[in-house]
Image: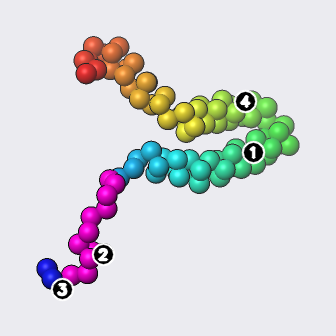
Protein backbone atom coordinates (compact mmCIF):
# COMPACT_ATOMS: atom_id res chain seq x y z
CA UNK A 1 0.00 0.00 0.00
CA UNK A 2 2.92 2.33 0.67
CA UNK A 3 4.05 2.18 -2.96
CA UNK A 4 0.65 3.24 -4.40
CA UNK A 5 0.51 6.94 -5.29
CA UNK A 6 -1.86 9.08 -3.22
CA UNK A 7 -3.86 10.02 -6.34
CA UNK A 8 -4.95 6.40 -6.74
CA UNK A 9 -5.64 5.71 -3.07
CA UNK A 10 -7.57 8.90 -2.35
CA UNK A 11 -11.31 8.69 -2.99
CA UNK A 12 -13.15 11.72 -4.34
CA UNK A 13 -15.02 13.77 -1.76
CA UNK A 14 -18.20 13.99 -3.78
CA UNK A 15 -20.06 11.06 -5.26
CA UNK A 16 -21.61 10.63 -8.65
CA UNK A 17 -23.66 13.64 -9.69
CA UNK A 18 -26.52 12.50 -11.96
CA UNK A 19 -27.92 16.03 -12.22
CA UNK A 20 -24.61 17.30 -13.53
CA UNK A 21 -24.46 14.48 -16.05
CA UNK A 22 -28.03 15.14 -17.15
CA UNK A 23 -27.28 18.84 -17.58
CA UNK A 24 -24.15 18.05 -19.57
CA UNK A 25 -26.01 15.60 -21.84
CA UNK A 26 -28.82 18.10 -22.32
CA UNK A 27 -26.28 20.80 -23.21
CA UNK A 28 -24.50 18.50 -25.65
CA UNK A 29 -27.40 16.74 -27.37
CA UNK A 30 -29.94 19.58 -27.14
CA UNK A 31 -28.48 21.64 -29.99
CA UNK A 32 -28.01 18.50 -32.10
CA UNK A 33 -31.66 17.61 -31.55
CA UNK A 34 -32.81 21.10 -32.54
CA UNK A 35 -30.65 21.15 -35.68
CA UNK A 36 -31.91 17.72 -36.75
CA UNK A 37 -35.54 18.70 -36.18
CA UNK A 38 -35.03 21.91 -38.14
CA UNK A 39 -33.41 20.18 -41.12
CA UNK A 40 -36.05 17.46 -41.33
CA UNK A 41 -38.89 19.99 -40.92
CA UNK A 42 -37.50 22.18 -43.70
CA UNK A 43 -37.17 19.10 -45.93
CA UNK A 44 -40.83 18.18 -45.37
CA UNK A 45 -41.94 21.75 -46.05
CA UNK A 46 -39.95 22.02 -49.29
CA UNK A 47 -41.27 18.69 -50.56
CA UNK A 48 -44.80 19.82 -49.63
CA UNK A 49 -45.51 16.79 -47.49
CA UNK A 50 -47.70 18.63 -45.01
CA UNK A 51 -49.15 15.50 -43.37
CA UNK A 52 -45.71 14.04 -42.70
CA UNK A 53 -44.54 17.46 -41.53
CA UNK A 54 -47.40 17.66 -39.01
CA UNK A 55 -46.72 14.12 -37.77
CA UNK A 56 -43.03 14.88 -37.43
CA UNK A 57 -43.64 18.12 -35.52
CA UNK A 58 -45.95 16.37 -33.05
CA UNK A 59 -43.36 13.64 -32.53
CA UNK A 60 -40.55 16.19 -32.17
CA UNK A 61 -42.52 18.18 -29.60
CA UNK A 62 -43.17 15.00 -27.61
CA UNK A 63 -39.50 14.03 -27.65
CA UNK A 64 -38.48 17.60 -26.83
CA UNK A 65 -40.77 17.72 -23.80
CA UNK A 66 -39.30 14.48 -22.46
CA UNK A 67 -35.78 15.70 -23.21
CA UNK A 68 -36.03 19.22 -21.80
CA UNK A 69 -38.42 18.51 -18.89
CA UNK A 70 -36.79 15.56 -17.12
CA UNK A 71 -39.29 15.48 -14.24
CA UNK A 72 -42.03 14.52 -16.71
CA UNK A 73 -40.74 10.93 -16.79
CA UNK A 74 -40.99 10.59 -13.02
CA UNK A 75 -44.44 12.18 -13.00
CA UNK A 76 -45.68 9.90 -15.78
CA UNK A 77 -44.26 6.82 -14.05
CA UNK A 78 -46.01 7.72 -10.79
CA UNK A 79 -49.29 8.35 -12.65
CA UNK A 80 -49.07 5.01 -14.45
CA UNK A 81 -48.24 3.21 -11.19
CA UNK A 82 -51.17 4.85 -9.45
CA UNK A 83 -53.51 3.98 -12.31
CA UNK A 84 -52.39 0.34 -12.09
CA UNK A 85 -52.94 0.31 -8.34
CA UNK A 86 -49.28 0.04 -7.36
CA UNK A 87 -48.28 1.77 -4.13
CA UNK A 88 -45.99 4.68 -5.04
CA UNK A 89 -44.10 4.83 -1.74
Displayed quadrant of residue 62: top right
Earlier sequence position, callout 1 versus callout 3: 3
Earlier sequence position, callout 3 versus callout 4: 3
The Cα atoms of the two marked residues, 1 and 4, are separated by 13 Å
| SS state under label 4 | helix
Q: Which residue is mark 3?
A: 3
Q: Which residue is mark 4?
A: 54
The Cα atoms of the two marked residues, 1 and 3, are separated by 56 Å
Q: Which residue is mark 1?
A: 38
Residues tagged 3 and 4 counted as in contact (Cβ below 8 A): no
Quadrant occupied by the N terminus: bottom left
Q: Residue at x 75, y 48 (%)?
A: 39
- Label 2 Cα crowd, 10 Å radius (few <14 / some 14-19 / many 20+): few
- Label 1 Cα crowd, 10 Å radius (few <14 / some 14-19 / many 20+): some
Camera-nearest label, 1 or 3: 3
Residue 43 spot, x, y in % from top left: 79, 46
The Cα atoms of the two marked residues, 1 and 2, are separated by 46 Å
Picture layout, residue 3 above or below residue 19: below
Earlier sequence position, callout 1 versus callout 2: 2
Q: Which residue is mark 2?
A: 7
| SS state under label 1 | helix
Residue 81 spot, x, y in % from top left: 32, 20
Q: Is residue 18 magenta?
A: no
Query: Which residues are drawn in magenta?
Result: 4-15
The Cα atoms of the two marked residues, 3 and 4, are separated by 65 Å
Amino acid sequence: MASIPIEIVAAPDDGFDPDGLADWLRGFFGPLFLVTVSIVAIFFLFTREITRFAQFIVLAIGIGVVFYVPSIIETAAKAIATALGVDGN
